[in-house]
Image (cartoon, helix red, strand yellow):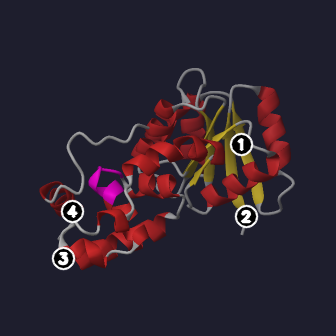
Amino acid sequence: MISRILIADDHATFRSGLRAILSTQPDLECVAEVADGRAAVSETLRLRPDLAILDVRMPRLDGLAAAAEIKASGLTSVRILMLTTYDSDEYLHRALTAGVQGFVLKSLPAEELIAAVKAAARGDAYVDPSVVRRLTPRIADAIAPAERQAQTLPPGMARLTAREHEVFLLLAEGFTNQEIAATLYIGDETVKTHVSRILTKLKLRDRVHAVRYAYRYGIVRVTDELDG
C-alpha cells in the first residue's frame, strides 16, 4: 500500500532533498510541496494525503498552528509529522498537544527519517531518538519503578505490570494517549490496551476516575511535574 505524502517547508532546497529521499521508497509518494503553513492547511484539506510533513517554522502560519488547524478540521485520516531544526521542549509539547504522530529533527539520518515517515504514516508515534535521550533523565525521575513503591501503593496497584504502572503514572499526570505513546516510545493502540487493562484491574470507571485515584492515594503529588 502506497502512502501519499505532503511536504511543507519554506526552504526549497530542503523540500526537494526530502522529496528525493522519499522517492527512493516504492511505498511512499509525494503528492504536493508547499512553502508555508497556510498552504499546508489548504492543500492538506484538498488532497487528503495520508501524511503531512510540516516544518515547525514557516511563514504565514507556523507548522504547529497548521497541525492544530488540520486536526481541528476533523480530517482524522491525515497523520502529521513535525520537522524542526530546533530541539525545543516547547515545540515538542505543542506538537504532542496538537495530536501529531511524530516529532523529528532535520539532522536525522536519511534512513531514520524514512523510518519516521513510514511509522507516522501508519499511525504509530515516533519521536526523534536524540530528543528521547535528552528527556530520559526527567522521565526516569518522574516515573518511579513499580517495585520501588510496592510497599506503599494501594492493593490494586500491585496487580499492574511494570509497563502498566508507567502508563498509569503518565495518565494520572494528564497525558493523552498520544503523549504517552511518544513518551514511552510505543504505539497508540498499545497505549489504549494498557489503559483499558489498568481501568479494569483498578476497577475504575474512566480516566478522570483514574486521576482521582492517583491523587487520593498519593501515587502522584500536586507538585509533581513533567516538563515538555
Q: Point out the tag, 3 or 1, that comes first from the N-terminus.
A: 1
Q: CA distance from mark 1 to mark 4?
A: 43 Å
Q: What's under tag 2, amino acid-wise?
A: Ile
The quarter of the rendered structure image containing the N terminus is bottom right
The image shows residue 44, relative to residue 27, as above or below, that is: above
Q: CA distance from mark 3 to mark 2?
A: 42 Å
Question: Residue shown at 71%/36% (left/top)?
Answer: 106
Indicate left or right for 171 with 81 as reference. Answer: left
The image shows residue 19, relative to residue 204, as above or below, that is: above
In this view, the mark in front (3 or 1): 3
Which portion, as a residue range, is magenta? 169-175
Q: Can the viewer see residue 73?
A: no
The spot of residue 32 in percent (x, y) is 71, 42
**The label number, if any, that marks residue 203 in the structure image:** 3
Badge 1 element: strand
Residue wearing tag 2: 2
Q: Are marks 4 and 3 in contact (CB under 8 Å)?
A: no
Determine crowd level at label 2: few under 14, some 14-19, many 20+ residues with C-alpha closer than 10 A. few
Q: What's under tag 3, amino acid-wise?
A: Lys
Residue wearing tag 4: 210
Which of the pair 47/16 is nearer the observer? 16
Q: CA distance from mark 3 to mark 1?
A: 48 Å
Question: Residue shown at 60%/25% (left/top)?
Answer: 58
Q: Point out the tag, 4 or 3, that comes first from the N-terminus.
A: 3
Indicate left or right for 94 with 103 as reference. Answer: left
Determine crowd level at label 1: few under 14, some 14-19, many 20+ residues with C-alpha closer than 10 A. some
Q: What's under tag 4, amino acid-wise?
A: Ala
Question: Residue shown at 41%/51% (left/top)?
Answer: 74
Which of the pair 157/68 is nearer the observer? 157
